[in-house]
Image (cartoon, rainbow, N blue to C red):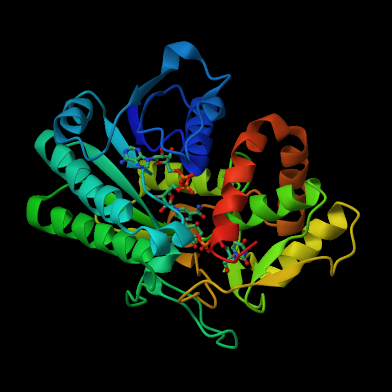
Amino acid sequence: MQRILVTGGAGFIGSNFVHHVLGRTDASVTVLDKLTYAASRESLDGLPEDRVDLVVGDVADQPLVERLAGEHDAIVHFAAESHNDNSLSEPGPFIQTNLVGTFCVLEAARRHGTRLHHISTDEVYGDLELDDPARFTEATPYNPSSPYSAAKAGSDHLVRAWVRSFGVQATISNCSNNYGPWQHVEKFIPRQITNVLDGGRPKVYGAGTNVRDWIHAEDHSSAVWTILERGRIGETYLIGADGERNNLEVVRMILEHLGRDADDFDLVTDRAGHDLRYAIDSSKLRAELGWTPSFPDFATGLARTIEWYRDHESWWRPGKDATEAAYAAKGQA
Ligand code: NAD
Ligand code: DAU
């Protein structure tokens, strides 16, 4: 696989994956990205110019995606509308990009016989009770809660149907919550870090007891590359790094790292339909493909991420006020 098409490669995880691939292999990468509000051209800075190309375009543009699919050995499909809160206020773009966009990618892969890896989320499984010792596995039934997760669940079903009906050479991964550099300030960890850096207070939904299973974006990238190289066609692999924390624990870690009182946060209006807990059992990926995370310790990864945001204010500052204004309009600021 020498020529990789990465959809959504100017977003948080996609750009991390592009750096990962160019840093560890001799493959070349074409990024197909619509450059929505969530994208960042700067996240692709510093890459070898002769091995990376950016095509600004829509994954739902069938002729464009078909042309690109014919010019590449593999497609890694990250492009999506990704934020649950936005899907509650305006679901339309989530249906268009996450469902119609994935349909276009599948048709292009079918036409050209191109290997495809589809990036999905653990949210397709719904949520777990806080006191339930269970974790999600590849056999957990789908039960999505939000327009975002329902659209991602639908996209997974499309991929499975195209594998079975048309023999498309695809794999799927469902990963837990990512953190790390280049994540938009609308998301939980960057929002709270930048609030504290601004001298403000973290804003925690509801009672703050919801649990997420955190993984560093670099570990998501290494897992995706492993599946692309060695995963079995038609299979789904869950990706996670045993990083369960509730939201209160995370904001307290951020506050303490930045020298503030651990209780210096606000509880704000809860998210509608807020999933209680996600937890991933990644045994299949580890046992079958030998993958292990390089950031097994969430505290270390979080500390590095806080320092990254402290050092990159010029990157996040331009979007911060508009993001907070949108939260304020919903009573979440
Ligand atoms: P992001 O919002 O940071 O980036 C999404 C990227 O896709 C942006 O660059 C955007 O411009 C691009 N994009 C959006 N619509 C497009 C379109 N119609 N055509 C082309 N490009 C388009 O998202 P992220 O957090 O990096 O998530 C990437 C993928 O990983 C998504 O598929 C998401 O469902 C999945 N995922 C995310 C997480 C997480 O914790 N963030 C966890 C598991 C899975
Ligand atoms: O589990 C994987 C998913 O993780 C991905 O599929 C999504 O693309 C990604 O956005 C993420 O979804 P979440 O909804 O879990 O992430 P978010 O960062 O929005 O919120 C994490 C938790 O923090 C969640 O319980 C809601 C809460 N939260 C969020 C924000 C933005 C707050 O308490 N305060 C906030 O300001």
228 is higher (above) or lower (below) than 201:
above
The answer to whether one can see residue 232 in this image is no
288 is higher (above) or lower (below) than 63:
below
Pick the residue in front: 84 or 112.
Answer: 84
Question: In which image quadrant can residue 234 be found?
Answer: bottom left
- In the rendered structure, the answer to whether residue 301 lies left or right of residue 3 reads right
| Residue at the extreme front | 329
x then y, percent, for residue 271: 52, 71
x then y, percent, for residue 226: 44, 45
The answer to whether one can see residue 129 in this image is yes
Pick the residue in front: 183 or 156.
Answer: 183
Q: Residue at x 47, y 32 (%)?
A: 18
Q: Which residue is drawn at 46% across and 55% down?
A: 83
- In the rendered structure, the answer to whether residue 91 lies left or right of residue 180 reads left
Question: How many numbered circles are shown?
Answer: 0
208 is higher (above) or lower (below) than 191:
below
x then y, percent, for residue 240: 53, 61
Q: Which residue is drawn at 73% across and 38% down?
A: 308
- In the rendered structure, the answer to whether residue 26 lies left or right of residue 164 reads right
| Residue at the extreme top | 50
x then y, percent, for residue 304: 75, 44
Q: Which residue is drawn at 45% across and 21% down?
A: 26
Q: Quadrant of the C terminus?
A: bottom right
